Image (cartoon, rainbow, N blue to C red):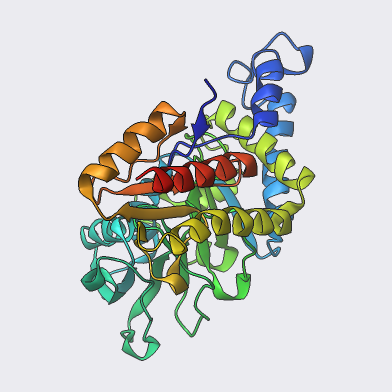
Amino acid sequence: MTIYNFNAGPSALPQEVIEKAQKSLFNFENSGLSVMEMSHRSPMYEEIHFGAISSIKEILNIPDDFEILLLQGGASMQFAMLPMNFLQSEQSAAYVLSGSWSEKALKEAGRIGDAYVLSSSKEDNYKSIPTIEFDSVKENTSYIHLTSNNTIFGTQWQELPEKQRTPIFVDASSDIFSKRINWNNVDVLYAGAQKNAGPSGVTVVIMRKTLLEQSNTSIPQILTYNTHAKADSLYHTPPTGSIYVLGLVMNWIKENGGIEGMESRASNKAALLYDVIDNSNQFYVGHALVNSRSLMNVTFRLSDENLEKKFLQEAKEFGFEGVKGHRSVGGCRASIYNAVPVDHVEKLAHFMKEFQNSH
């Protein structure tokens, strides 16, 4: 049976990348060494490492005044590292709440210093992206943190807010490499790789170099961004296998239209599912408001709970993997990241129509 992978993360990798990795991951360029065995100080690995960083810069059109870091610990580690580096005493950090991950980022920052909620859509069960009132930003605020796409609730910033005077930090774990980024409005952008960039184990952090000069120097050395920037993300042994596959995914993006190609791909796939939901006469009910809908995670419910269970059971029997919603909210969710083929989304849309017709 064919498996159609709609998992929210770790999620689908491009089939071409899997095939390339199968051939070379365990015997890189006929060297007799797997990527996981070779020294991370060797010229052979450095080619992999710096090639991946160069491709990230090219795909996202990152200006020269930004540093690109490949770190470990996932995006959750960044929830702590960012305030440790940039939330100094007598300062505050502002958090925009649009879902569970932004709540977790706020909670972690609160363990380190003064963190406050600038705006939130929690009162409507995170069905929309909140409006930022920049006039409400406290004078001593060191940064504003937001999450660009919310996997659990299926909402996404259509455009990142236009930066005022306060730096903006963006958790883009679930929509990086799916759309263009206006770097004028971003000071830090970070993402765990396991949704759109590659396998878990590596985190991409893109940061203005001027911020590195302002980071806290009194915290442990391994937790300072400057440490990793000065060492080209080779301060300690990097997750070599994950970075290798990350580089393969970057090559796949370039071969498939670059960031513009990914934007078009995301829009087309999302439209297939939202069209089914919108034309179902409330048989399927989307969670997110239309102007806040995610192009990465389509969330919906069926009006009858027993019917919803039947839908999820039959979907799994047909090979649709990962369609059950997050345990905290329930319902259904189709995660359609870059690597999910269009024809897999077409098959899910067809299944949804057939299920509705049968019930």
Between residue 116 and residue 146, name the one nearer to us. 146
Residue at the image position 53 percent from the left and 81 percent from the top? 162
Residue at far front of view: 358
Residue at the image position 57 percent from the left and 65 percent from the top? 208
Count of marks placed on residues: 0
Residue at far top of view: 32
Up-down relation of residue 163 to residue 85 (above or below)? below
Between residue 22 and residue 342, name the one nearer to us. 342
In the image, 203: left or right of 129?
right
Residue 8 at least partly seen: yes
Up-down relation of residue 282 to residue 10 (above or below)? below
In the image, 292: left or right of 243?
left
Q: Where is residue 189 in the image (x, y as percent from the top left)?
A: 52, 60
Up-down relation of residue 321 to residue 355 (above or below)? above
In the image, 308: left or right of 81?
left
Q: Position of residue 331 (x, y in %)?
A: 29, 49
In the image, 83: left or right of 232?
left
Residue 197 at least partly seen: no
- Say which quarter of the image contains residue 130: bottom left
Up-down relation of residue 139 to residue 68 (above or below)? below
- Say which quarter of the image contains residue 125: bottom left
Q: Position of residue 312 (x, y in %)?
A: 34, 38
Q: In which quarter of the image is the C terminus?
A: top left
Residue at the image position 38 percent from the left and 81 percent from the top? 132
Q: Position of residue 291 (x, y in %)?
A: 46, 74
